[in-house]
Image (cartoon, rainbow, N blue to C red):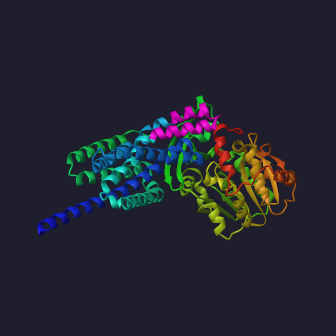
Amino acid sequence: MNLSSQVLEDNIVDNISHRKNIIFWCLGFSGMSALIFEIHWTREISFVIGSTTYALSTVLAAFLSGLALGAFVGGKYTGKRNPLRVFGLLQFAISISAFSVHFVHNSLSQMFEWLYYSFSDWPFVFFILQYITIFLVIIIPTSLMGAAFPFAMKAYAKDFNKVAEDAGSLYSINTIGSVIGAILCGFLLIPYLGLDNTEVFASVLNISIASLIFILLKDYKKLLFSLAVYILVIMVYFFIPLHHPFFNIYFAGRVPSQDIQNVSGDYEIIWERDDIEGKVEVARSGNPPMYGIRIKGKPEGTLKLENDPKQLLMTYLPLASRPHAHSFLKIGLGPGVTLATAAKIQSLTKLDVVEINASVIEAVQKFFYPSLFKDRRIQFIVDDARNFLSRRIVQYDIITSQPSDPTDQSSGYLFTKEYYEIVRSRLTGDGVFSQFVPYYLLGKEGTDIIVKTLSAVFPYVYGWNLDEVGSLLLISSVTPIKESADIIKARVEKYNTNLKYSFFFGAGPAQLRQVALNKNIPVNTDDKDLIEFIAARRLLCYTDC
């Protein structure tokens, strides 16, 4: 072989190696973009269908189905086109079509309103149709994502003897990119850029990959065309207003179908934050204005609740059961009504509140109870309640737990035996634990499970009925409460005379122990969180379905 032939061969090898490196890294960034889109879509769709395990599983299943479909179809056509050029075109198409959820967002409410009010009495049918609807919404971008891999593989693998090695390398970098995308999206992009800019960031990755491929192929016509179309779509993206969905599965069951649009139209979103732990929104309605708070699309209360017996009794009942209490821990801040009520009790010298979502605390300070942040007795702790209680060796006279309705894992695991054991270890010798039970959502089945679970940890459990629709407050302790229910009720009425007819004693330890002894009632545990799934199912029908 002469020198010129050797140089030519070396150049060819270098060009092939250079091209393979570009394809390798492009597929990694493509995987990063795909996972960012997946998380973004999940968050955006959850404002309508909720963040229950059923909802999140449905979105993930629809996403993976689109990938599988695209990979199957793409694999059939890899030998009929220039694979590298098609890979570039696919990345361009992804950067455009991935905005589909944004553009149909304003129609999601109509879609799921019809699904809910038509099929909520048949949960299995509803979940199947929910999956089909979401799949159709994201089928184009996810199929294109799935098709990108076989075309990248075809362009990358030129040596038949190294096909397995090349496939492993591409799959590895694509997976690594996906991991990095998931971390970036959850911990940095959404909290700091917001949902819309996060979506744009992901699309920029795809159009950048497409541009690089077209430059590599020296196809400058496609490069200029793709950039021009992309810029046009981005302009349209930011000019189309995104309306907040009027349909929300968390309150749909409580509102007749003909009234739901009117109910949602009575308020406007005046403040929002995209937090790692979920989006927080503050809504304003009425004249004079009244503020309400939503977390991950779930209504968590309004300032109207400051006169709501349920909120007041979350403080007064445990305090009346242990009137000498000095330390008070609130799990979950919500709109701050319960904490504000506790702050009025001067005998409480230490008031801690644990809230996992920092944006909730910011909202309460801005719109609900700014005075709480001037009270030196109060400490706001941004942390997971279980982590805080496990890590901090601090004991309290009263611990009151009022997390969000247990429709998802983040709140569902605050109703398990393991959680109650941690709570018990952080109570003083005669301290009491107050657990709010949303009977209106859990029904008899879920409520009996909570009673049995609490009774497995606390020897003394007392049940109080808070209103006619079925909210319960369970007061638990290691030592018996010596005062009678009448004395405790009288103490509560001294705190607030308006509460006289708002609550009544339901059952004592002896009666509730009969529920605990029922072998047909299971205990709620971390391993088998039954409460979460009972609550999620009953969002559909609010009956024992």
Q: Would you say residue 348 is visible in this rendering?
A: no
Residue 457 sits in quarter: bottom right
Q: Is residue 500 left or right of residue 330?
A: right
Q: Would you say residue 72 is visible in this rendering?
A: yes
Q: In the rendered structure, does residue 117 fall within the stretch colored magenta? A: yes
Q: Is residue 501 left or right of residue 246?
A: right
Whether 196 is drawn above or below 427: the answer is above
Residue drawn at x 35%, y 54% is 153
Residue 9 sits in quarter: bottom left
Residue in the foreground of this view, choosing between 165 and 271: 165
Residue 528: x, y in percent? 68, 54
Extreme-bottom residue of the structure: 393
Residue 220: x, y in percent? 20, 48
What's the magenta region?
A: 109-137
Residue drawn at x 66%, y 49% is 532
Residue drawn at x 44%, y 47% is 67
Q: How many marks?
A: 0
Whether 99 is drawn above or below 158: the answer is above
Residue in the foreground of this view, choosing between 28 and 478: 28
Residue 223: x, y in percent? 24, 48
Q: Is residue 436 left or right of residue 175?
A: right
Residue 87: x, y in percent? 32, 49
Residue in the foreground of this view, choosing between 180 and 171: 171
Residue 459 sits in quarter: bottom right
Whether 539 is drawn above or below 163: the answer is above
The C terminus, quarter of image? top right
The N terminus, quarter of image? bottom left
Q: Is residue 526 left or right of residue 458?
A: left
